[in-house]
Amino acid sequence: MAETVGKLFIQDLTNVLWYIDRCNSNTFTQQYNLPKVFEDFMGYNNPQHYKHARPRFDIEELNEHSECLFKYATRPWMTRPPFSIFLKKPIIKLGEDLSKYTKYLVYKCMATSQNQELDQPVIDKYNHGQLKIFKANEICKPENILKYRNLSLALQDKQYWQPILADDFCFSMSRV
């Protein structure tokens, strides 16, 4: 029994950790803390060796991994030492965090799709950059006023939320 159940448990736990690492464990750990027991297993999935970019977290697959961990946490052998001492709590925490992250991703997907359906752009007051246009400064050198005249006119013609590439209007400036 230990060979079959133990082997399946190790395979499933490895699949969970490999999946988190493959999809970028940093993305997951920005929201939730990975249990210390599993931290040493992160960082081995090296995406530089792949031909494609890192895949994104899939909501269904995260949910499957979460349910799989909960299934093992309720097994009778998990309630007995040595597993109950060092492994049960981290397994439950990782399963809960995966479940919470799934809910977070569902919420973000819904918010994104709602925002994309809007006719006007969504402005986040806390995370957006601003560019203010100040009235002309009479103290400025005339050559500076001429140098930025095209940019100033272009900014005045655009709506406040429309992007503009300032480099197109400052071509004569030296780039560092």
Image (cartoon, grey):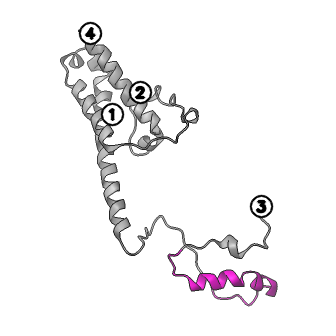
**Foreground residue, 32 or 67?**
67
Can residue 36 be seen here?
no
Mark on residue 176? 3
**Callout 2, which amino acid?**
Phe
173 horizontally vs 118: left or right: right
Q: Are marks 1 and 3 in contact (CB under 8 Å)?
A: no
**Callout 3, which amino acid?**
Val
25 horizontally vs 156: left or right: left
User: Mark 2 to mark 4: distance in Å?
Assistant: 22 Å
Query: Is disc 3 surrounded by few (<14), some (14 to 19) or many (20+) residues within 10 Å?
Result: few
Earlier in the chain: of badge 3 and badge 4, it is 4
Query: Is disc 1 surrounded by few (<14), some (14 to 19) or many (20+) residues within 10 Å?
Result: many
Vertical arrangement, residue 90 with respect to residue 128, above or below: above
**Callout 4, which amino acid?**
Ala
Please count the marks in the image: 4
Position of residue 145 measured from the top left corner of the image (x, y, whole percent) = 75, 85
Q: Looking at the rendering, which quadrant does residue 47 occupy?
A: top right
Can residue 138 be seen here?
yes
Position of residue 67 measured from the top left corner of the image (x, y, whole percent) = 24, 33
Query: Which range is magenta?
Result: 135-162
Vertical arrangement, residue 35 with respect to residue 122, above or below: above
Query: Is disc 2 surrounded by few (<14), some (14 to 19) or many (20+) residues within 10 Å?
Result: some
Mark on residue 94? 1
Earlier in the chain: of badge 2 and badge 4, it is 4
User: Mark 2 to mark 3: distance in Å?
Assistant: 44 Å
